[in-house]
Amino acid sequence: MNEIPKKKFSFQFNTQTLVFIVLIALWTFLSITSSHFFNINNIRNLFSQEAIVGVLAVGQLYTIITAGIDLSVGTVAALTNVVLTLLVINGVPIPLAIILTLLLATGFGVANGAIIYELNMPPFIVTLGTMSIAAGAALLISGGTNISGLPISFSSFGSGIFLGMPNLFWLLIIAVVGGEIVLRFSRFGKYVYAVGSSVEAARLSGVNVRKVIYGVYILSGFLAGVGGVMLTARLWMGVPTAGADYNLNSIAAAAIGGASLFGAQGTVIGAFLGAIVMSTIYNGTVLLNVNPFWQEIIVGVLIIGTVALDQIKKRQKYTYTKK
Amino acid sequence: MEKVLEVKNVSKEFPGVKALENISFDLYKGEVHAIVGENGAGKSTLIKTLTGAYVPDKGEIIIFGNRYEKLEPILTQKIGVTAVYQEMVLANDLNVADNVFLGIEPSKSGFIKNAEKVTKVIELMKSIGYEGLPIDAIVRSLSTAQQGVVAILRALSRNAKIIIFDEPTASLSSKEVDVLFKVIDNLKKRDISIIYISHRLEEIFRIANRVTVMKDGKVVDTKDINSTNVNELIKMMVGRNVSNDFYDQSRKIGTEILRCENINNYKVRNISLSLKSGEIVGLYGLIGSGRTELAMSIFGADKSTSGDIYIEGKKTHLKSPEGASRYRLSYLPEDRRRQGLALQLSVRFNINIASYKKISNFGFVSMKKERLVSADLVKALGIKTPNLSQIVSNLSGGTQQKVVVAKWLAANSKIFLMDEPTVGIDVGAKAEIYNLANQLAKSGGTVLFISSYMPELMGICDRILVMNDGKIAGEVKRQNFSEENILSLAIKNQREANV
């Protein structure tokens, strides 16, 4: 009776598993219906499409687990893209330019965290504001037009292949593995969940809530910067309007992957899978000659579907134990 | 005199508790009838029965000559019974006039007649002799007393003839109390009948005509205010036996571990106390006396705190719970579901949440230690959970409380500030919590046991500190334990108590 069953590895039928199954099903379906799908070039293309949203989704996920949100990731990435382009074509050495733009993006994270924590403001509003500021700044300094003239090395990195997969994909893998390890095994990661579950309980348990809130938004800002650098490599120019879709797509990836906007739920792996599912749908609709306007409708249904399934599952569990 | 309300032999039972037992009570036209009793005596249940929130199991209620076996909130409002609660239920962001006429706005084809509304509010204010209320002020910006007046106006706008006040003065200053009493006087003159519930016995002697004492869900007696006094009322409110079942004689009281000097915050004033190892000290006080606020201050969770805290003789500066937990201080919050636990997370997580620093290297947590620490404590405290990954929200109240204790044991705490640790826990689990408190003290720790339930404090504590109105009104040693001693410290006003 007193013996506690030790679970070495708990593999529950959770949302991540569900998304994984959906993904396998999608891939199987597409492999059968389209001869072009399971082609190395297509897969590479799919993964490099996914890479940027995936990286942003990792930071997004951290803020969502604290019951917050970061709406600014996409436009901060776009701003990073524009600033980096301008710096490089004006003669700043590439490594220095990258460091400077990453600092800029991280600065947005610091600002988000500071305003949210110190002024006790809702993350939605604060990051809505910084989203708009970053978008405006990108347009302002670019004059509203695309900026070209980047050295070829950017483009060759962006389309480069390492160990059979695109460079950008490997950057995503680093972000995902690092993000998952920190979230799952570090003290900071534990506190992220604790704050998301109850700020008051975390505080009264001796958790420094300020560090956690600053931490997640700084991480999210930094990863938005990384996403912006990747964007520059992929587009080979500065595009001030490039980030528009990334904000909501990163949230969608986290949500499909099992993150709860109420906090304390979600994993990086889930968000990663969510991002792949979304890119697969975009890719698949093109291959199958489906009207591309269907893409967003399918993604919308998928978001609501997975979250609904999760809720239904929880309700059953609850009534089961209540009995 | 005309009886406006009569309660006859009303009983109400909840699973395991007889909340009301054969209650009989009446109210005359234009009188103030006070109800007094300890926390949990059944006053609130009685009110909820009168306003229709609860349906009595037995008995009948007669209002204005009509017999009712059960009431419903809409019905009671229609016949003119309204309660003004301690926590006002007003729409905080609307203005005074909007609040008074919320739901019954004077209107014509869907549009509100504002001028008429304002005139009516002014009339109502005149009728209660209180005209200092800005009609277009947002309710949130008003003082607590003014909000109370808004609630009274709202009741009057619905033609209330019986108004029930539940602890209306708990958060009022003495000046504000005077204002409220003037209003109540005017209500009386208008033949409105009032049921007035309060812990502050002196107040009752200022405004009530009669007083009913309740205890353990029963009416002890109803008296004319002129034929009784404070001491007699206290005597009637108490009278339960002290149980020694949970007192552990083998605890050895050692050296001082915690000393607080002159703690002040927005609620408590000049509190000094000292806790020794092996000791269980009770902290009694009525609701609103500042017990939780004191514990929060000691634990570093209240930024408005001033004063000195010494832990094992050393002066410390506790500015945050984070700092306090480093000094082996812990706090078990009253609202454990909201403040004590990360509800959606696992037992393992909750046990370790305060001590991840101890089991991590370079910021990374040792999963093995995390599991071992929680498994050990689950076993040691007998936490009933199917496995360590169990989400705590699905556990019972007693088990959850044990998880909170385990959290602080994992963090190596020595000083335990327990705020109502047995609230909402069944009897068997309560006994386990008492034993746990004994164990904690026995192993060299010290426990400050905050409770509103006197029998449990008298059962396990070595001494009981009594708070009253933000101050410590006195200390009662075990040999002098009696409900009368403790309650009179908790109820009487400070000047009287210090004599």
Image: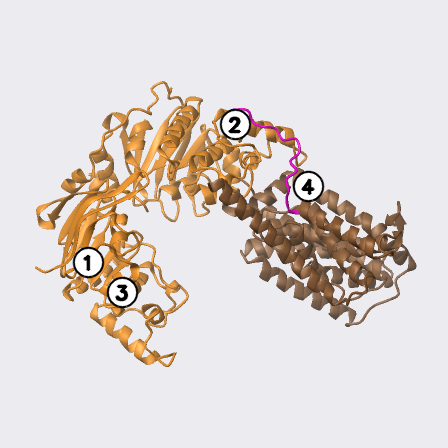
| Magenta segment includes B149 | no
Task: Identify the secondary structure beneath mark 1.
Answer: strand
**Chain for colour brown:** A
The amino acid type found where label 2 is placed reads: Leu
Label 2 or label 1, whichever comes before in sequence order? 1
Q: Nearer the viewer, residue B302 or B79?
A: B79
| Alpha-carbon span between mark 4 and mark 1 | 62 Å
> Which residue is under mark 1?
B194
Kindly indicate whether the residue at mark 3 contacts the one at mark 4 (C-beta within 8 angstroms).
no
> The disc numbered 3 marks a residue on which chain?
B
Nearer the observer: mark 4 or 3; the answer is 3
Task: Identify the secondary structure beneath mark 3.
Answer: helix
> Which residue is under mark 2?
B377
Kindly indicate whether the residue at mark 1 contacts the one at mark 3 (C-beta within 8 angstroms).
no
Q: Callout 4 environment at 10 Å: few (<14), some (14 to 19), or many (20+)?
A: some
Task: Tell me, yes or no, whether dots 3 and 1 are on the same chain.
Answer: yes
> The disc numbered 2 marks a residue on which chain?
B
